[in-house]
Image (cartoon, rainbow, N blue to C red):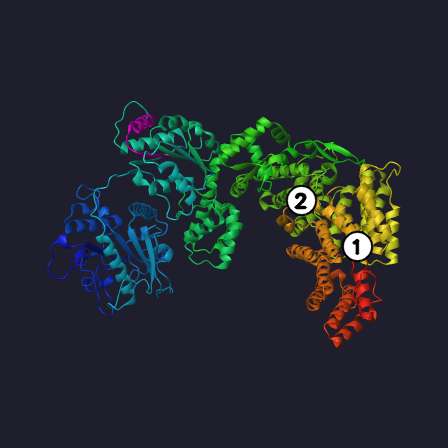
Amino acid sequence: MNTSLGVHDLRSGSPTDPGSIAIDLVAVHGLGGHAFNTWTHPDSGTFWIRDLLQDRLPPIRPIVFGYNAKRVKHNAELDFADVATQLLAGLCRLRLLPEAVTLHTEQARSIAKCVHSFLFFATPHCGSSFADLAVVFQRITKVILDPPNNFLRDLCTISPELQNLHGVFNGWLTKEEIQCISFYEGFKRKSLFKNSIIVTRESAILNVPQEETICLNADHSSIVRFKNAEDDNFKIVLGKLKQLVDKSKQTPRPHVRRRSTHLHVPYMPGRYFVGRKTEITKLRDWLLDTEQRECKVIALYGLSGVGKTQLALKFAVDHMSHYDYIFFVNGTSLEVLRNDFSKIQKSLMISEDSRSAIDRMIDWLRSQDSHWLLIFDNANHLPLIVPYISQLIHAGQIILTTQDARVEKSDFVHSSLKIAAFTPEESQELLFSRAGLSSPMPKDIKAAETLLAEIGHLPLAVDSAGAFINVRRKSVTEYANLFHRFQRDVLDHRPHASSYDRSVVGTLELNFKEIDSRPNAYTLLCLLVFLDRAEVTEEFLKRGTGLKPTWGPSGESVLTHPADRYVPEGLITLLNNDFIFDESVEELISLSIITCTSRGETGRAFMLHPLYHKCAKFRMTRDQRRTYSADALFFLAHAFPTDEYVFEKGTGALGRSYIPHIYYAYESFNYPLNDLSIKCFESLMPKSPAGLTPCEQVANLILDANITYGQGDTAKNAYLLAWMDDLLESSSNLYLKARALEVRLAIDFYDVGDYLGGVKAAKTFLTGAKEAIKAKPELLDELTNAQFGVIEGTIAELLVIEVSVAENFEESRALLQGWSALNPAAPSSKEAITLGIRSRIRGKLSKDHGDWVVGEGQLKEFLDIFAVRGSQTEGWAAGDLAHVLMEMKHEKEAEKVLVKYLQPRRESQTHKERMRDRRSDTIYLEMLLGECLLLQNRYKEAEDTLQDVLQHLQNFESLWHFEKFRILFTLSALARLRHQADQFSSALEYWGKVLDYCLKELDTYKQKGKWGRDTLIPRIVLLSMADCYFELGNQEHALVLQQEALESIHSCAEQRWILGLGTYWLDWIKMKINQRIPYSKS
């Protein structure tokens, strides 16, 4: 017979009167342990519970309990319930106080009232990861790991039994305010496999309010074995025991509990419940703020998987002492509701009669004087449950959970609370806790941030991801890679350890099925899932199905019907009928598939949760994905403004706000599962009466986006341009191809400094186009002719930017004079705009050639007659005019021009938005304003403005060539500022930056050799540095630099288009070098 099993009183000598015992200390070993050996040091033989406590803590009675913790030597297979029964029976025999023992029998009612505190030594409260490893090796390592199978099953992290016990136990500890001390391992244990912490800190901690956590310098096997009374770990444990004993002496003997709560819930809140403190506080304030406990109905609403049920259960369990009864019923359907009420009725032994189970339960609840709480879960069909709630609103308290946001308007609901997705911080806390990662690596934290944003911080998805990582032993980075490769499979997977009863896909599918039966809502949803989900405004939706002004072949405005641009008739009908549209929106909101907010003049704004956005596509067939993806593209093409500055009198903000939709439409088009090739695209529908093929219509959308000179995202724009080329490959539409070339000239040539390459490409295109027109004259119309005029103007501009010499200037001027409208006496509206563009370019050419007075007149003419308010061309022309005025020493007038055109651009955006905006004209105007302030010796204002521009440009990851030039100019202006302010050491530093930037950033690729040390700008920099050295007394170094600069500066090509550097600054620095006299602008 094994004498270690059962309960053992360890007091030395004969037992004393139990009445003299202040505290029973009951020690229970773990798996693989022994009633005596577990607590005995292997070297000293000290059995500390018996040998070291009685003298130091005389009021206690040390008790140990032994149970069958192995399988090899004992054939019986016990589980936790069996062992608990043995322990309680032993305590009942040992103790004389009948109220001191709890069993679900009449013998002993409440051991809970006699428990004062707990000490846990590396106890796996929700299963250690080592236990899962034991499952794998239990058959081949019985000698090393041989716990009973039932224990092993329950100890695993995925054990529902253990999770349920954990929830009940934590709820009781919290309610009764039981003191807990949890000791955890500080050392790794050497094992057959590797050195490891057997029970991690996360698993060893209960996370209850009255818990104290302490690390002991021991591994798992030595954490409860102390060599002697001088052992440091023993001193810590003894100190905590003394505190608990002293505190227990001041605690009154327990009495019978005032209220015993009848808890009828299907499961307890999960162990990994995080956050929601604000929500729980609100529930407490609403339901428990007065002693009378007013009868109230509280609604928790939000999308599926957001944690409404978990929140309701958490509140109920944590506050169960306030209620006599807590009930939980599922309101999914009448049948489910009837079954749940029937189970409760049987549990309460309510007699049956002819009435339904629901009616009997309602009558019973109404008849009770006791306090009860009823949780109505999944009450998504409000009309179904409102009749029952209306009968109970004056009888008790009700929490209902629903997806239907309309619940907040219900007459029967006293207060409602929208349950939102987690914050990023809460998501990370749940993910890492659920995954068992106490110290995640930086790369895992970064991967988690991206992953959690993709799944919208939805608790269901976060919990599922964490459980997946834990069970499969993956890192967050590995899970994120799996998620991106197999999104559908991962989201449709429900780990056994999950706190939720369905996968993400399974949960959302319930709502999708509801929408399947509502055709209009389904049509609207199918549009939304193929647009960017961030925010879709009502104005945007209406634009996609209304009449749209566009350019006709005659070069005049025409109104285009959406049907002529392939927008489906069903979508047109839906969005143009306010009643049907509002009804569809309401149905999507009622299931929390979309959220709706007011946006003032733009009407309502709708947002789709990321997971609905993903999962809606997963459930579609390939043909459905093709159709709805194409529908969204055509809708977007019609909604996107054409020539916004002309037709909309806008500032470009509308088009910029729609660009994310174009990016997403491109991604949808290229998504492998959609299989939507160009060939397939053309076969979807015939050519429209408006004359554009489907491919041409989508290419026209990309062109309308005007993704040049700082619009949009550089990398994504490159994808769009490649797509545009594919779409137009078989097109014979010269207008669209000319527009495509205009975009290409800006991005492929101007942005990288390949100006002559751009000239060559443009000339080649025009030559081919003219040959095509010669063979087929009907290809040329006013619209196409206007676009040809823009291309010729761009050639003229590129020629002068390359090098402003007489030969290039004459060729540019000839190009600008050679184009005309098809009917010069009566140009079309589009041709008139081209005339204006060429007028601006003439002014720019005169400026770049140094013809300041002529340039001033031409630029003013453009701004007064042709400029479209808010457009980039207007901004560029205003900047060029200010440049000319500064060269003419009219700084005050230049400042007025700059402020006039900057102000509306600044007012349309916050400073933060401007710092993210890459619009070329705005940055140009800001840069010139800094120069203008510098010329007026307003150094502080100039410094602030120029530093702002520099920071703005440096925010961008990769810079275009013209943006690099602007950094160069800004650095040079900051150097000149210091130079003029006699801060020569600081000026030298900045001049060094300018020189370095020329050589490393600008003298590359197609500009190689044009920004080297022997070219104009670096020579001016060297001359400026020489002057600084002269001023600082280093004449020898100054002369060396001066000689190098002056040797070839006169042979360098003039570059008057660089404001100040090649003109007034160069003149002043040369004068100063030669004459050594103070600076004077006069």
Nearest the camera: 458 or 69? 458
Which numbered disc flags the more N-terminal residue, 1 or 2? 1
State the quadrant of the N terminus. Answer: bottom left
Q: Residue 88, can we see it?
A: yes
Q: Residue 838, can we see it?
A: no
Neighbourhood count class around disc 2 (C-alpha, 10 Å): few under 14, some 14–19, many 20 upward: few
Please report the bounds of the magenta region as a residue range. Answer: 357-375
Image position of 473 (left or right of 127) = right
Residue 928 is situated, as x and y percent measured from the top left of the image, at: 74, 54
Quarter of the image for residue 278 reads: top left
406 vs 478: above or below: above
Residue 479 is situated, as x and y percent measured from the top left of the image, at: 48, 53
State the quadrant of the C terminus. Answer: bottom right
Q: Amino acid at mark 1?
A: Met
Q: Which label sits on residue 886?
A: 1
361 within the magenta span = yes
Nearest the camera: 628 or 214? 214
Q: Secondary structure at mark 2?
A: helix
Residue that lies at the very extreme toward the left in this rendered image = 14
- In the picture of the structure, the residue carrying the numbered disc 2 is 907
Quarter of the image for residue 1023 reads: bottom right
Mark 1 → mark 2, Cα distance in angstroms: 25 Å
384 within the magenta span = no
Q: Amino acid at mark 2?
A: Glu
132 vs 363: above or below: below
Q: Secondary structure at mark 1?
A: helix
